[in-house]
Amino acid sequence: MVGSAEAATQGAPNGIDAAFNRFSMQDPATGSPLLTYTEHLRELRDRVVKAVIALVVGMAIALLITDGIFQLLLWPAGDLKLIATGVTEAVGAYIKVAFITGLVLATPVWLYQIIAFVSPGLTQGERRVVYLSLPGVLLCFFCGVLFGYFVLLPPALKFLLEFKPDLITTMPRVGDYVSVVSGLLFWLGLVFEMPLVIYLLARVGVVTPQSLSRFRRYAVVGAFVAAAIITPTVDPVNQALVAVPIVLLYELGILLSRIAVRARGR
């Protein structure tokens, strides 16, 4: 009795491993166990460390070209001279630009780490779709950034900086300018991901073209609400420059969802 109890004790996992082992994940295709939750936490830690290292390396590279990035950010505003009203404001804005640039440079690494972490829970077909969509994710994001930089920023900044010039002399702080410009470009980059996200959701059966078509009117309202949040101006013309592309992207998403449904039915 004692020997059998000791053997059972020695064979059983201890502590938190025992609790997690009862809930080990399974491969959706074969049903075979994959990693325990503790092993998933270790994997998550390793992947986060790799993503952080990539970000640090990206920031180190970005610090070498931050002056050029600043010049690019200032181009849509013309001959604008920025001021700093705080002791650390200029340095903080400089580091912020380097951080954002480093994050962009490290995008392939941290995006791969995210997908590699969740891929064991996907079927083989879903993994293939996700990996094939990676270039599209990057392309859509940069299309949104380019749209904001060349189409939206020049008129938006012109409206903001030349508002009532006979009464007000606008002298933007460097921190505010960097926050407004980088925030606008970032959110437009995310918005341009919408067609691809809709395609992926349709491919796995979460949404259908019919449901998307039924919600079209709500999408139009949501596009103008999103434009009012994203656009730094209250000018309806500038807001329409954001809202109309969002509506068109939603329509493109509906078209891609039909393609996804046909591809899923094969």
Image (cartoon, rainbow, N blue to C red):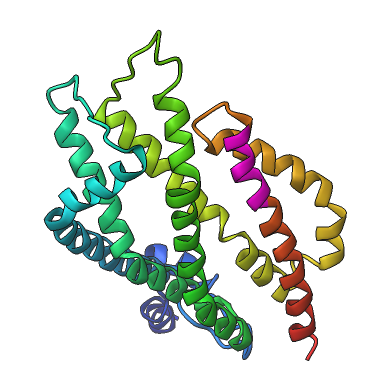
Q: Let me know if residue 204 appears in the view.
A: no
Task: Farthest residue to the top: give it.
Answer: 167
Q: Is residue 157 above or below residue 261?
A: above
Residue range of the region highlighted in magenta in the rendering? 237-246
Give the residue displayed 80% in from the left and 86% down from the top.
265
- Nearer to us in this view, 263 or 175: 175
State whether residue 174 appears in this view: yes
Could you tell me which quadrant the N terminus lies in?
Answer: bottom left
Is residue 176 inside the magenta stretch? no
| Position in image of residue 254 (x %, y %) | 76, 65
- Could you say which is closer to the camera, residue 137 or residue 227? 227
Q: Is residue 235 above or below residue 133?
A: above
240 displayed left or right of 143: right
Instruction: Give above or below for 53 relative to 126.
Output: above
- Looking at the picture, how far across and down is residue 185, in whole percent? 43, 48
Give the quarter of the image for residue 209. Answer: bottom right
Q: Residue drawn 56% across and 58% down? A: 192
| Quadrant occupied by the C terminus | bottom right
Q: Is residue 60 left or right of residue 14?
A: left
Q: Position of residue 121 (x, y in %)?
A: 56, 76
How many marks the image carries: the answer is 0
Q: Please, what is the dominant secondary structure of the magenta stretch?
A: helix
The extreme front residue here reads: 166
Q: Is residue 35 left or right of residue 250?
A: left
Viewer-nearest residue: 66 or 166: 166
Residue 238 located within the stretch drawn in magenta:
yes
Residue 216 drawn at (x, y percent): 81, 52
Q: Is residue 225 left or right of residue 173?
A: right
